[in-house]
Image (cartoon, helix red, strand yellow):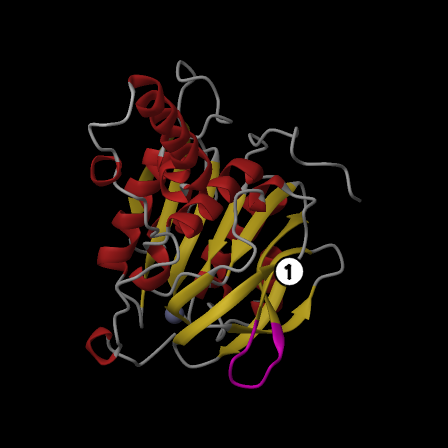
Amino acid sequence: MSHTTHSQRKLISEKWSRFWVPSPISHVSGKFSSVTNFTLFVLLQFALLTASPVSAMSSRDSRQEPSSAPPLKALFITGGVYHDYDKLAPYLTSHLSGLINIRFDLVTNLDKLSSEHFADGYDLIVYDFCLDDVDPIALDHALQVGHKGKPTVFIHCAIHSFRNSSKIHQWEDYVGLRSKFHDAFGPFATQKVTTCNSIVADFPENWKTSGDELYQTIKVLPKTQPLITAKSPVDGRVHIVAWVHRYGRARVFATTLGHDSETAESPAYLRLLANGILWACDKLDNDRNPKCR
Ligand SMILES: [Zn+2]
């Protein structure tokens, strides 16, 4: 959550993923032989393939199901306070659909949760909202659906939601971690803390966001596996910002990152969400997922 407006923030135009590539035109003169030109061409192609996180992460995931497979069907539940979900949610769903074979149904409130069958027909539920209150029956339905095994992804303020509910600790058990507060909106860097999960295989070792809210970790469930942490620029404490765990029979991926477009527009962040979705659905290849535990 934040009371900081977009206009108050300094926009940083250079993202981590932008890089400089020399122009082949300005460096190849007519005196070079065709062999030299061909060599330069091959070297340039190699450089582009190996040095471009943007191009590597903006194409469809080669690890997804074959294109002939039906898309995953996801229910994306958004809405609430402190965030521009009208802009953020469509941005995420459209870009994630460009990365992996998935189709989203986007809803902007919890009305669907009035039915215990709200998740029927969906492969995955994504919670990306910011709501202090919840109808106890709706929360029960969400918990039941998760416990029975529905793959689930939690994004940002969903982890801080339902603070006024008497069942907040049950929601936190579903999430896999307890957090109540966050640092003020600002830039910070992250660190990968495991190589044992393919969700973070493509994530940079020292990724930076130009602005987000660093959620403070209060309690971690015993079986929660941290994937990424961040050290607070304010007080030096280290907090978990992405993790996986199991809730009942459900595979759960969660990240506290993603307050607004400062993080959401990062290709690495979108890839993290895409991988988390695939992992929750048990669709992420295991060839880069050694059995570490
Ligand atoms: Zn926020």
Displayed quadrant of residue 129: bottom left
Q: Seen from this angle, which residue lies furthest top?
A: 68
Q: Seen from this angle, which residue lies furthest right?
A: 293
Where residue 20 appears, as percent x and y from the top left, is: 32, 50
Closest to the observer: 22 or 167? 22
Where residue 85 appears, as percent x and y from the top left, is: 28, 59
Where residue 126 appears, as percent x and y from the top left, is: 44, 47
In this rendering, position of residue 64 left or right of residue 287: left
Check residue 286 for magenta coloring. no
User: Which residue does the image show at 67% across and 40% down from the upper left?
Assistant: 249
Please, is residue 83 above or below residue 51 in the view?
A: below
**Residues in magenta, as a range:** 231-238
Check residue 232 for magenta coloring. yes
In this rendering, position of residue 87 left or right of residue 268: left
In this rendering, position of residue 10 left or right of residue 284: left
Q: Ligand 1: give its quadrant.
A: bottom left
Closest to the observer: 4 or 16? 16
Label 1: state its secondary structure: helix
Position of the N terminus, as image quadrant, is bottom left
Where residue 228 appears, as percent x and y from the top left, is: 59, 58
**Of the residues shown, which amino acid type is indicated by label 1?**
Asp
Displayed quadrant of residue 59: top left
On the image, numbered disc 1 is attached to which residue?
173
User: Which residue does the image show at 50% across and 67% down from the upper left?
Assistant: 189
Disc 1 residue crowd, few under 14, some 14–19, many 20+, Cα 10 Å: some
User: Which residue does the image show at 62% across and 42% down from the upper left?
Assistant: 250
Please, is residue 285 above or below residue 27 in the view?
A: above
